[in-house]
Amino acid sequence: MANSIKTAEEQQSLSKGLYFFTIVRLCIVFIVICGMIYPLTSTAIAQVIMPSQANGSLLKNDAGVVVGSELIGQNFSDPALFHGRVSSIEYKAEASGSNNYGPSNLDMLQRTKDFITQWQVDNPDVPLNELPIDLVTNSGSGLDPHISPDSAIVQIPRISNLTGIPASQLEELVNQHTEGRDLGLFGEKRVNVLKLNMDLQKLVKS
């Protein structure tokens, strides 16, 4: 009887040992597959199929220097350039998000008033009632690289006065950079501000 109990205990101990080593082997297999093979394979495929997107959709100037990503907005303060949306995080990609203020929040109201006041100073030729709402509102991420075509058009008088480029030529530039709805159905027409300013600077130099 004692030998039988001892044998059962030995078998149970052996089974636990086998389970343990099975679990260890499975962990090693999944670490190799999920932690090494899968990410390396997906990265390699992405680099072949869509290298630009895989590397951050970076944009370079004529000198080959990276000036930004077409996916992340920038704070353009030069009045001779097109400006993007208001960003409560100053377009810092590591701080993506917004304060999620309600329409009655005093900080947001003051920020909006300050922006409108500055807008009137910088754009005296544009009536305030023509100021598009997306120029005075923060996007959900605070990183939106796009503005509406109307938001680009209303900035043309200021830019034309400062650069000497005819308004008609600037309007054509905005039209060239106007992107349609995704698949013709989703989203709204939009203009990538960084791409637009890169071509604007080329016009200024020429």
Image (cartoon, rainbow, N blue to C red):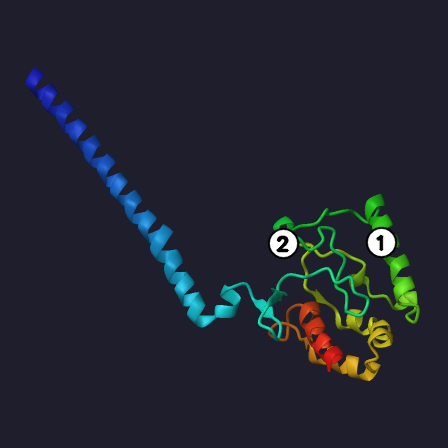
> At 81% across and 59% down in the image, what residue appears?
136
Q: Are marks 1 and 2 in contact (CB under 8 Å)?
A: no
Q: Quadrant of residue 65?
A: bottom right
Q: Please tell me which residue lies in front, 194 or 106.
A: 194
Side (left or right) of 35 relative to 61 = left
Q: Quadrant of residue 8?
A: top left
Q: Which residue is mark 2?
A: 93
Decide: is 2 above or below 26: above
Question: Where residue 112 is drawn, which disc sits there?
Answer: 1
Side (left or right) of 108 relative to 55 = right
Task: Categorize mark 1 by other alpha carbons within 10 Å: few (<14), some (14-19), many (20+).
Answer: some
Q: Secondary structure at mark 1?
A: helix
Q: Is residue 51 visible?
A: yes
Q: Position of residue 206 (x, y in %)?
A: 73, 82
Decide: is 75 above or below 187: above
Q: Secondary structure at mark 2?
A: helix
